[in-house]
């Protein structure tokens, strides 16, 4: 039995709870963290430990979906399952459209109920993407169509879109899915410190791209990332600071010669020639060829 009011209230409570725990959608959750949620005195884990689609037994509509972590080198689901209009696809549980979990996602779709998408950033660690909606179904391909943000609910699944619309959806996808997942992966690899100055405050750290978004090799992969504090991120993006492929930090000549207060002296000038801090795991270290290409741009800018 569908109790629409209950379905709406529990979603509002769950989304509020997540906002309190994770205001900027960048904190990774473990299953145990998500088991702390309760509503009207009843404990209701937000994610299913075993299954991709979470439907609490007393509810009619699904509450969340889950995508498990994909190790580097394997095609990621968000590259794999995107329709021509740019919207994501989520596979049925099994191949029976009437499986109770598929039915529960269909109920959420029919009643426009928001859901949460737990997206694996690392083994056992999930970013909580929300709210999302199920906006269509492709039974012949055993999948649902997902709108990963409210703007996407305006796009008709399967409809041909022009290049501007597609670029717009892709940009939103980067912001809403790739960036939070990339941030968790990069900050974890760099042990939550700036690769240039070692500052250790998550609130002041970003996951910077070596080659930018939009560049053919500007992918959201850890090897194209650097954990940088806000100042060094901006300085890197604006070519005030470069990183040589041999991992030496280089401060632009005119910045080195300028005279100003302690932020310039300690924050920038003293970073010249320091060794970049890199992840312990070799597989996570910056890709030298991308550093080289990016460093050439820094040199040209200088
Ligand atoms: Zn820094």
Image (cartoon, helix red, strand yellow):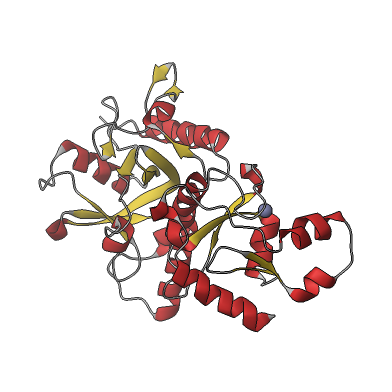
Q: Closest to the observer: 167 or 197?
A: 197
Q: Quick one: quadrant of the C terminus?
A: bottom right
Q: Is residue 18 visible?
A: yes
Quadrant hosting residue 241: bottom right
Residue 161 percent across, percent down from the top left: 36, 76
Instruction: Name the residue located 21 percent from the left edge and 54 percent from the top edge.
Output: 143
Q: Closest to the observer: 296 or 219?
A: 296
Residue that sits furthest to the bottom in the current view: 300
Q: Closest to the observer: 4 or 175?
A: 175
Q: Is residue 8 above or below residue 165?
A: above
Q: Is residue 142 above or below residue 63?
A: below
Instruction: Name the residue located 47 percent from the left edge and 75 percent from the top edge.
Output: 215
Q: Quick one: quadrant of the N terminus?
A: top left
Q: Is residue 34 left or right of residue 242?
A: left
Q: Is residue 193 above or below residue 221?
A: above
Q: Is residue 146 above or below residue 301?
A: above
Q: Closest to the observer: 258 or 27?
A: 258
Q: Is residue 81 visible?
A: no
Residue that sits furthest to the top in the current view: 41
Quadrant hosting residue 156: bottom left
Q: Is residue 34 left or right of residue 228?
A: left
Q: Is residue 223 left or right of residue 264?
A: left
Residue 78 percent across, percent down from the top left: 33, 58
Q: How many marks?
A: 0
Instruction: Name the residue located 31 percent from the left edge and 51 percent from the top edge.
Output: 71
Instruction: Name the residue located 33 percent from the left edge and 55 percent from the top edge.
Output: 72
Residue 261 percent across, percent down from the top left: 89, 58
Residue that sits furthest to the left in the current view: 96
Residue 266 percent across, percent down from the top left: 79, 55
């Amino acid at each position: 039995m569908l109790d629409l009011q209950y379905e709406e209230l529990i979603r509002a409570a769950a989304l509020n709870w997540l906002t309190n725990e994770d205001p900027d959608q960048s904190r990774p959750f473990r299953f145990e963290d998500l088991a702390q949620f309760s509503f009207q005195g009843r404990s209701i884990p937000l994610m299913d430990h075993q299954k991709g689609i979470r439907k609490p037994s007393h509810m009619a509509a699904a509450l969340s979906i889950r995508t498990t972590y994909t190790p580097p080198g394997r095609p990621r689901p968000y590259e794999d399952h995107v329709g021509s209009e740019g919207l994501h696809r989520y596979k049925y549980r099994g191949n029976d459209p009437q499986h109770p979990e598929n039915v529960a996602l269909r109920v959420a779709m029919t009643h426009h109920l928001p859901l949460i998408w737990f997206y694996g950033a690392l083994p056992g660690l999930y970013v909580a993407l929300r709210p999302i909606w199920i906006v269509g179904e492709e039974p012949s391909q055993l999948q649902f169509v997902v709108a990963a943000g409210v703007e996407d609910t305006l796009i008709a699944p399967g409809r041909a879109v022009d290049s501007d619309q597609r670029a717009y959806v892709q940009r939103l996808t980067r912001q809403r899915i790739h960036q939070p997942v990339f941030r968790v992966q990069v900050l974890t690899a760099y042990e939550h410190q700036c690769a240039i100055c070692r500052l250790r405050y998550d609130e002041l750290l970003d996951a910077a791209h070596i080659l930018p978004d939009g560049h053919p090799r500007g992918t959201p992969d850890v090897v194209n990332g650097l954990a940088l504090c806000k100042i060094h991120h901006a300085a890197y993006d604006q070519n005030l600071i470069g990183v040589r492929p041999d991992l030496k930090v280089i401060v632009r000549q005119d910045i080195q010669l300028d005279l100003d207060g302690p932020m310039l002296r300690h924050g920038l000038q003293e970073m010249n020639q320091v060794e970049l801090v890199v992840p312990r795991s070799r597989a996570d270290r910056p890709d030298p060829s991308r550093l080289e290409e990016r460093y050439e741009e820094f040199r040209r800018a200088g």
